[in-house]
Image (spheres, grey):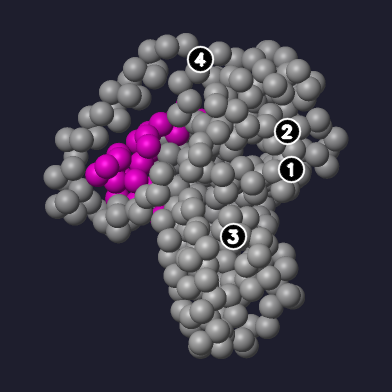
Amino acid sequence: MNFKKPKFWDLNKPNYLAYLLLPLTLFIRINIFISNLFPKKKFCKIKTICIGNIYLGGTGKTPTTLKLYQLLKDKNYNVVNAKKHYSYQQDEYLLLKNKSQVISSKTRKEIIKQALKKNYEIIIFDDGLQDKTIDYDLKFVCFDSKNLIGNGLLIPAGPLREEINSLRKYHCVILKNIDKNVDLTEFISKIKKINPKIKIFNTYIKIKNIEKFKRSDQYLIFSGIGNSKSFKEVLIKNDFNIVEEKIFTDHYNYEDKDILEIIKIAKKKDMKIITTEKDYVKIPNYLKEKISFVNMDLEISEEDKLIKFIESIINEKN
């Protein structure tokens, strides 16, 4: 499913188009209401963690999933990542597979069954907060600090899968930042009013392989992710000389002709080509030598505190 996010979703306030679409949010409200009517299953023999969002796309779920996986591995937990199978999200699955142990299946319950058979202690789901069947032991909600909740409305009038008040039922918020000086005091205060017990952690994007690049070179960048703007901002903050940018829809399935056209443009203007690691895994192998990717990592503020919080939940007896 290739989807381009409408620009009006991220306005500070709803515009006339958002208000025109407001009646259609009734379908989302009905779906949420029905979901809350039925009990969800909690699994006793394995601890379940879900890294999700209420803002549609581009909030850093997959990097957060990989980071928490590594932190728990370092603590000697027998942990596995999980991704429900969607044909249009194979980029995220491949990225998880390249960097961790991962299980994928058509349902999350089936994924848990497979994890139990392999005697895993903890399973981390990349996405799935809105699953109607599972009661996760630990539920994380990711936000991008630039977009936060956009215009604050539900799909299709805005970018929200659930209203901001849904944070009362979650354990932890992860804020993805590019700039360490960004002031999120007002948003954090809003979250705390909704759920005083919720934990909030800031994360900062850093480029692990930055020494690979000459910042004085001219670059053409391209991406097909939930938040291409964030990708560009990270590069600019790290002094990359970006001359041209190509943006594709989220989870875009690249054809050879797309990449060949990018290579042609870059060669003509003497530019180097950079993309995201998530996009790079979808490029045909014979064309990958022409393209580089930036290896993004998350730096977590108060990392030790986050680990202790996770352990306090996963070590609880059901």
Tell me what residue is drawn at x 45 percent, y 29 percent. Answer: 130
Q: Which residue is mark 1?
A: 100
Q: Which residue is mark 2?
A: 80
Alpha carbon distance from label 4 to label 3: 39 Å
Amino acid type of the residue tagged 2 in the rendering: Val
Q: Quadrant of the C terminus?
A: top right
Residue 85 sits in quarter: top right
Left or right, residue 242 beside residue 312: left
Q: Is 163 contained in the magenta span?
A: yes
* Closer to viewer: mark 4 or mark 3: 3
Left or right, residue 173 beside residue 214: left
The main secondary structure of the magenta stretch is: loop
Q: Residues within 10 Å of mark 4 (few under 14, many from 20)?
A: some
Helix, strand or loop status at disc 4: loop
Q: Which residue is mark 3?
A: 283
* Closer to viewer: mark 2 or mark 4: 2
